[in-house]
């Protein structure tokens, strides 16, 4: 219908689509665009980017690994003694003089020449901790008559029950022409 000069239209105005401003080129762009149609800038939020989630996972793994390492280190420290034995004499596992607090004893240590520059250090390790030791390792340093180090010997075992002796044999190949004359028990580790 016409009324004078005016024409009536049945058309309603369309609402304008929501817009946002590109952070790179400052163009007005559709609000839900992941890229700017003008400059091609990536407009995804940080939490929608793949690298963000990779970093989150790596940080979580590092935190878990750090917690596990701390727990394992505490377990080893709680269950480990360090003892020394030099010139072939053995000593017991705890610095305390009370036998009830000793975690182990080491006895009957001796160097055996196997020939061809191979030596073993044998002895008896006894678990006196009152509980099973899941893993134990002995580390010896072998020295020649002048006191120079000529080798290192290791022995280890698992699941050593309480009050159980372990007859160990730690192998060493000497790197010098001098035969080992003495030894020193440098470390006993375990958990």
Image (tube, rainbow, N blue to C red):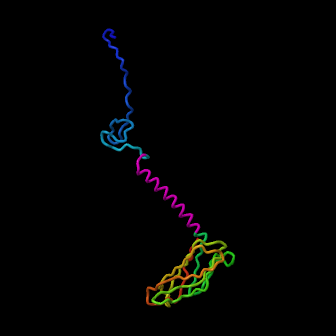
Which of the pair 174/115 is nearer the observer? Answer: 115
Quadrant hosting residue 90: bottom right
Residue 164: image x %, image y %?
64, 78
Residue 100 falls in which quadrant of the image?
Answer: bottom right
Residue at 67% x, 79% y is: 97
Q: Residue at x 52, y 58 (%)?
A: 64
Residue 9 percent across, percent down from the top left: 34, 16
Is 105 on the left-hand or right-hand side of 38? right
Relative vertical location of residue 37 with respect to residue 135 in this rendering, above or below: above
Q: Horizontal and vertical percent for residue 173?
A: 46, 84
**Quadrant location, the C terminus:** bottom right
In which quadrant will I find the N terminus? top left
Residue sitting nearer the eye, 88 or 110: 110
Q: Residue at x 43, y 53 (%)?
A: 54
Q: Quadrant of residue 2?
A: top left
Q: Position of residue 55 (x, y in %)?
A: 44, 54
Query: Is 40 on the left-hand or right-hand side of 133?
Result: left
Count the numbered circles shown.
0
Q: Is residue 69 magenta?
A: yes
Q: Main secondary structure of the magenta part?
A: helix
On screen, residue 9 above or below 167: above
Tell me where the magenta segment starts and ends, as one range: 48-75
* Magenta span includes 22: no
């Amino acid at each position: 219908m016409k009324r004078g000069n005016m024409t009536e239209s049945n058309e309603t105005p369309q609402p304008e689509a929501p817009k946002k401003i590109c952070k790179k080129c400052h163009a007005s762009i559709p609000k839900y665009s992941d890229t700017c149609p003008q400059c091609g800038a990536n407009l995804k939020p940080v939490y929608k980017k793949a690298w963000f989630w990779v970093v989150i996972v790596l940080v979580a793994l590092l935190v878990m690994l750090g917690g596990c390492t701390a727990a394992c280190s505490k377990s080893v420290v709680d269950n480990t003694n360090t003892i020394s034995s030099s010139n072939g004499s053995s000593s017991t596992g705890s610095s305390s003089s009370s036998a009830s607090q000793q975690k182990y004893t080491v006895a009957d240590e001796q160097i055996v020449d196997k020939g061809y520059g191979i030596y073993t250090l044998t002895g008896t390790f006894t678990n006196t901790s009152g509980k099973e030791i899941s893993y134990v390792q002995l580390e010896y340093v072998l020295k020649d008559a002048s006191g120079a180090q000529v080798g290192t010997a290791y022995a280890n075992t698992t699941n050593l029950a309480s009050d159980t002796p372990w007859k160990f044999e730690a192998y060493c190949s000497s790197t010098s022409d001098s035969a080992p004359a003495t030894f020193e028990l440098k470390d006993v580790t375990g958990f």
